[in-house]
Amino acid sequence: MGAVGTVLKKIVPSSVIRHKLGVKNSILFTFDDGPKPGITPEILDVLDKYNAKAVFFVPSANIHKAPELLNEVLDRGHILGNHGHSHTPCSELSYQEIVDEINQCKQMIFEQTGFTTTLFRPPCGIVTPALLLAARKTKHAIFKWSLDTGEYSYLLRAPADKLAENFIQKIHDSAIVLSHDTFGEIPKLVDIVAPQMQAKGYNLSNAVEQWR
Ligand SMILES: [Zn+2]
């Protein structure tokens, strides 16, 4: 991080960047980059089937594609997260631009739903010193993950059974799972892994309560 990063580490508590849950025997699914008609509703149905509650991180430039789905996410017991407006990685933005991205997304989600976001998922997972300051300024926690289901990275566009095999091998207690409600295999993935996680005793619904 360099000298600036060292100073930031002293003034910003490490708890502002979250990789895992502070709750035991629990797993949290998170879905980025929607809303996507056809896929987001299918994920909502699968989550209902297992009474699982998730966080949907929405870039506000996407809201117009299906604004009513944001309301449905909340109506069905999930919460919304802030994913910036334009999905530009923070490494390409100044401090003020990051503040503006977070505030614009927060405002647009609020106008559509009345929900106030407090969690920020950095586009592409990139955290910079400027983001640490911008997150503090906008009162958002930086919400990363401990398990990436891989459909846009190391298992690019893999079928659900392959994604599930990898998930089951890597899942751990207090995991924050990164996935995307823009990829058609994800509803099937959740349908395969959710009952197996519940059989192992993991709670798939309690983690979101703290951010309502
Ligand atoms: Zn994203």
Image (cartoon, grey):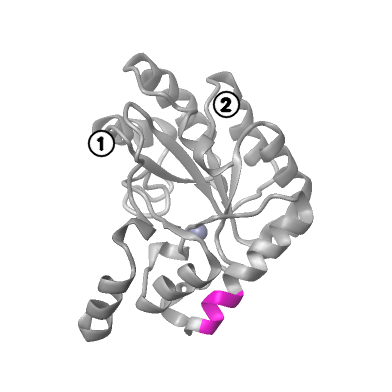
Q: Is residue 153 above or below residue 178?
A: below
- Which residue lies under the disc numbered 1? 170
Question: In x, y percent, where is residue 39?
Answer: 63, 40
> Residue at 37% of width from left, 37% of height from top?
163
Along the polypeptide, which appears first: circle 2 or circle 1?
2
* Crowd tier of the residue under label 2, counting other residues whose Cα lies within 10 Å: few below 14, some 14–19, many 20 or above: some
* Residue bounds of the magenta highlight: 96-100
Q: Position of residue 21 (x, y in %)?
A: 36, 41
* Left or right of 157 in this view: 69: right
**Where is the C terminus found, in terms of image quarters?**
top right
Q: Residue at x 43, y 75 (%)?
A: 133
Disc on res. 23: none
Q: Is residue 5 above or below residue 159?
A: below
Q: Quadrant of residue 153?
A: bottom left
In the image, residue 103 lies in the stretch drawn in magenta: no
Left or right: 95, with 169 as reference point: right
Q: Amino acid at mark 1?
A: Lys
Q: Secondary structure at mark 2?
A: helix
The foreground one among 10 and 124 is: 10
The residue labelled by disc 2 is 46
